[in-house]
Amino acid sequence: MRLLACVLSLTFMFTLACRTNESPEAQVNDLEITAQVKSKLASDVGLSTVPNISVNSTNGVVTLSGQVDTADQKTRAESVAKAVPKVAKVVNNLQVTPKPTGRLLRAQGSSARAAG
């Protein structure tokens, strides 16, 4: 939890310096929205998926990007973000990239041996 607070503090400092199109109040709201979305993603979608999801909030518009394993995770991530207070809109740019199964890995290994 302390790590999250530290990361959010650093993000806050860098964000304030870079966003000249937002008032300080709007910047704080966006940081709160981003933190809440990330927290809810961790609890609702799963901790193993969250590192692959980038969350950005500007003027209440949340953009999700990165990779998830299933279409269900993509849909759930969007629903979670929409449920956070002060979110005006969610842009879901998540890509579904299924993890290779054991069967697929074995097939790839045998085809590599056959080619070699």
Image: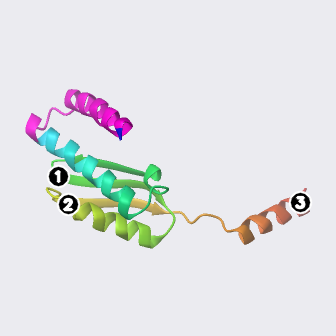
Residue 13 vs 81, above or below: the answer is above
Kind of residue sitting beneath label 1: Gly
Question: What residue did someone put label 1 on?
Answer: 60
Left or right side of 18 for 115: right
Question: What residue did someone put label 2 on?
Answer: 89
Mark 1 residue element: loop
- Marked residue nearer the N-terminal end (2 or 1): 1
Disc 3 crowd rating (10 Å Cα; few below 14, some 14-19, many 20+) is few
Kind of residue sitting beneath label 2: Lys
Disc 1 crowd rating (10 Å Cα; few below 14, some 14-19, many 20+) is many
Q: Position of residue 34 (x, y in %)?
A: 26, 48
Question: What residue did someone put label 3 on?
Answer: 113
Q: CA distance from mark 2 to mark 1?
A: 7 Å
Question: In this view of the protein, which residue sits in the foreground, 116 or 28?
Answer: 28
- Marked residue nearer the N-terminal end (3 or 1): 1
Residue 59 vs 105, above or below: the answer is above
- Marked residue nearer the N-terminal end (3 or 2): 2
| Quarter of the picture holding the N terminus | top left
Q: Main secondary structure of the magenta part?
A: helix
Which numbered disc covers residue 74?
none
